[in-house]
Amino acid sequence: MKSLSSASFLLLSTVVFHLFSSATAVETDAKPSIISKGDSKLSQSDGRKFCVSKPEASDAQLKKNLDWACKEGIDCSPVEPGAVCDDPASLRSRTNYAMNTYYRTRGETKNACDFEGTGRLIDTNPSYGECTYL
């Protein structure tokens, strides 16, 4: 095996250095990634928090949260039957939209996402298809 001359080694080291430097710069300048999952578009790390129901919340609690948030004056028309956020037509999906809208309109405080202990904050944008969470 031949040994590398000093000049060859220096040239090779410089090329490797620039390759790694370029890769790092691309990563740090990259915009938040968008993950496509069917019709779902989940934005990761856009810096915002989203209020959704805890997985263990019962249907009764979800219904109570949905009714309460809508009575508090948020716009619940996107989650009405046949509306843009009614597909999938699940109680949890509709409630999550309403809970997040309430959270946004009430100053994005931790208390605005409590919902008697059934709400939680997440980092992943739950928007999907034409249903865009505030």
Image: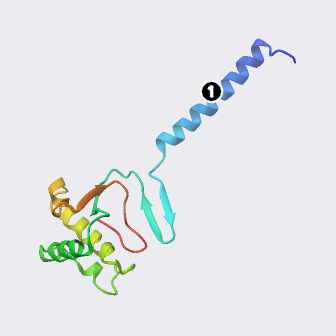
Front residue of this view, candidates 60 and 133: 60
Q: Secondary structure at mark 1?
A: helix
Question: Residue 84 placed where, x, y %?
Answer: 35, 80
Quarter of the figure that contains the N terminus: top right
Picture coordinates of residue 112, whole percent (x, y): 16, 60
The residue that appears at 15% across and 63% down in the rendered structure is 116
Compared to residue 46, the image places residue 18 above or below, namely: above
- Report whether 20 appears left or right of 70: right
- Picture coordinates of residue 71, whole percent (x, y): 13, 77
Vertical placement of 25 versus 89: above or below? Answer: above
Residue, x 28% and y 70% (percent of image)?
Answer: 97
Which residue corresponds to mark 1?
17
Left or right: residue 77 compared with residue 71? right
Q: Amino acid at mark 1?
A: Phe
Quadrant in which residue 114 is drawn: bottom left
User: Residue drawn 47% across and 42% down?
Assistant: 29
Q: Nearer the viewer, residue 112 or 33?
A: 112
Q: How is the image coloured?
A: rainbow
- Mark 1 surroundings within 10 Å by alpha-carbon count, few (fewer than 14), some (14 through 19), many (20 or more): few
Left-right relation of 28 to 18: left
Residue reaching furthest to the right: 1
Tag count: 1
Residue at the extreme bottom of the image, as rendered: 82
The furthest residue to the top: 6
The image quadrant where one finds the C terminus is bottom left
Q: Quadrant of residue 86?
A: bottom left
